[in-house]
Amino acid sequence: MGWLSDECEARCRGWMIAAQGGDGEAYERLLRELLPLLRRFVGGRVPEASAVEDVVQNVLLSVHRARHTYRSERPFGPWLRAVARNAVMDYLRSRQRRVLRELPLEAAAGVAGELALETRPRGLSPELRSALERLPSGQREAVELIQIQGLSVAEAARRAGVKPGALKVRAHRGYRALRGLLAEREEL
């Protein structure tokens, strides 16, 4: 069983197909059915309770904007999960960028000059920072641009001066290497 029960999957799939055909009532039923499911899904992934409803609304907007991409011969649940997961990841990246930008007031006194020179992100565990430093420079750059700075692949590729496909390969290899380095550390 997926994240939707078989009955819910059948109902939602039918409503989505009808909505794609212009049935507004079916679309409204679909959104009402999805709301509690999305609240649970997002609530389990977004640490701030105050942000859950905003992220749920973004998921619903994403469903609305992307509804034409749903293919009726496919199950509905995996499509919805991908849309919801992407909205959650967008929020988490945005949150991470905000956390890295913000500095407590007491720490801001006397360090403005240092911050301008600093290139390493704050907030990373010492283990992760150490593992990142051990990566080859291209992989490290790809991981930092995408995961730490939260850039899109296209923007990260522009900054790195490579094609998006090449950046994705570097990032994937970097993720795999990081998992290995962090696993080694846990075994010690």
Image: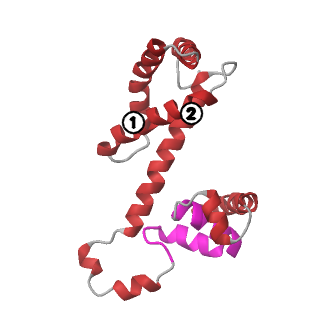
Q: Residue furthest left?
A: 106
Query: Looking at this view, is 159 or 168 the one in front?
Result: 159
Q: Looking at the image, is mark 2 or mark 1 earlier in the sequence?
A: 1
| Residue at position x 57%, y 25% in the image | 77
Which quadrant of the structure image shows residue 135?
bottom right
- Residue 3: percent from left, percent from top: 53, 26
Between marks 2 and 1, how big is the CA–CA gap? 14 Å
Query: Looking at this view, is 161 or 10 the one in front?
Result: 161
| The C terminus: image quadrant | bottom right
Which stretch is magenta?
Answer: 120-148
> Given contact means CB atoms under 8 Å apart, are the residues at marks 2 and 1 in contact?
no
> What residue is disc 2 on?
66
Query: Looking at this view, is 78 or 61 the one in front?
Result: 61
| Residue at position x 58%, y 36% in the image | 82
- Element marked by disc 2: helix
- Residue 52: percent from left, percent from top: 35, 40
> What residue is disc 1 on?
57
As shown in the figure, which amino acid type bears the numbered disc 2? Answer: Ala
| The N terminus: image quadrant | top right
Relative to 21, say whether 130 is above or below: below
